[in-house]
Image: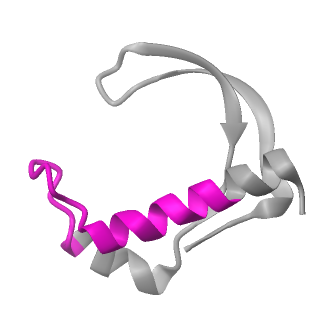
Amino acid sequence: MVADQTQVQSMSITAEDQHGDPVEIDGIGIPIVVGSDEIAALLAAYDPNASASPTAADSRVIARVIMDSLKLYIEGP
């Protein structure tokens, strides 16, 4: 799992959330690419009804991709 650092950018969106409610937000868009070889394992280990899912290890990997992207975007290389 990696972020495409060349395409991180400020943006505004108007969309719907997972419940169909309207959302308007100004923020930073981060394109994240999940490798084809990672998808099955991530989904097999994920239970949307369990508050402890995904695992701490999986959550940490996802969070670090996002946080590293934000840090690089805001602070530069």
Span of residues in magenta: 44-68
| Residue 59 in the image: above or below residue 21 | below
Image quarter where the N terminus lies is bottom right
- Tell me where residue 37 sits by quadrant: bottom left
Residue 41 vs 56, above or below: the answer is below
Residue at 61% from the left image edge and 19% from the top image edge = 25
**Residue 63: % across, % down:** 48, 59
Is 6 positioned to the left or the right of 42 in the image? right
Q: Position of residue 43 (x, y in %)?
A: 27, 69
- Furthest toward the left, the residue is 50
Count of all numbered marks drawn on residues in the image: 0
- Tell me if 30 is positioned left or right of 48 in this view: right
Left or right, 30 with reference to 10: left
Tell me, yes or no, whether the highlighted magenta stretch contains residue 53: yes
Q: Is residue 74 left or right of residue 16?
A: right
Q: Quadrant of residue 4?
A: bottom right
The quadrant of the picture occupied by the C terminus is bottom right
Horizontal and vertical percent for residue 5? 79, 62
Q: Is residue 66 above or below residue 45?
A: above
